[in-house]
Amino acid sequence: MLKRAPSRKPVPPEDRHLEVLGRSVPLRVVENARAKRLTLRIIAGGQLRVTIPPGITAHQVNDFVERHRGWLEERLKKLPEHPVVRSGVKIPIRGVPHLIRHEPGKRGTVSVDEEEGQKLLIVFGDERHLPRRIADFLKREARKEIEPLVAKHTQVVGRPAKAVRYKDTSSRWGSCTSDGVLSFSWRIMMAPRPVIDYLVAHEVAHLREMNHGPRFWKLCGELCPDTKRCKDWLKRNGTALQAIRFSE
């Protein structure tokens, strides 16, 4: 009888830095047993991630990155410079730009208003706490928006969610564990409503299909008919939303 070859453990992620346009950019190399080819992504805040199949050498990774240096430079030029939320700047809420206004003389936390057609995000109290209060506001809005969507989509798939959690993840917008725990980045509240719905549909679909195969995407499309457009929107705009800083 032939002995079955022992499965090889994936190589731990390797972190390094790459010099691009005169700045040192974080680069993480991650091996994925299911990967068929090398892929390069720009994730939160301009960080780089190279996903590789098993057996790829460091020399091959370096050669791959160098071949894509021109593409990297063009993409990194367009990224925002980690804007910090503060009075006088705008951030999107459900895809709609809101002007941040600080009013220290009033009690409370954050409220939404409108003035001459401009949506306002009014933050009260000490200005030092303004970024944190806006982050807390987005977390509360995420709960109000996402939990009804989870209830709607789980009813369709016939699988309940064990729990719904909210995080500030740097490289992914949501996740679903094998025991049914759904997690979402509260930053998704800066995206348009259809994109929020797509994200929830995507993670709920994983309750039945723990993969990204054809059956998964078919189910995702049934839950959210606008899946392709919303997926593309998040791919184009997600990095900019992840780059926004809610702390000094």
Image (spheres, grey):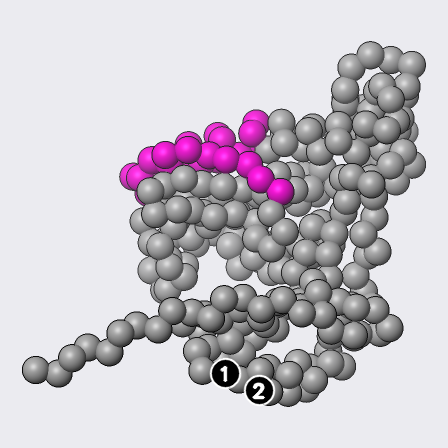
Q: Residues within 10 Å of mark 1 (few under 14, many from 20)?
A: few
Marking on residue 60: 2
Span of residues in magenta: 143-168
Quick one: quadrant of the C terminus? top right
Residue that protrudes farthest toward the top in the picture: 107
| Residue 122, position as x, y percentages in the image | 83, 25
Determine which quarter of the picture holds residue 62. bottom right
Determine which quarter of the picture holds residue 71. bottom right
Is residue 58 found left or right of 85 in the rendered image?
A: left
Q: Secondary structure at mark 2?
A: helix
Q: Amino acid at mark 1?
A: Ile
Q: Is residue 130 above or below residue 40?
A: above
- Can residue 85 be seen? yes
Q: Amino acid at mark 2?
A: Gln
Residue at (41, 61) in percent of width and height: 212
Residue at (77, 20) in percent of width and height: 109
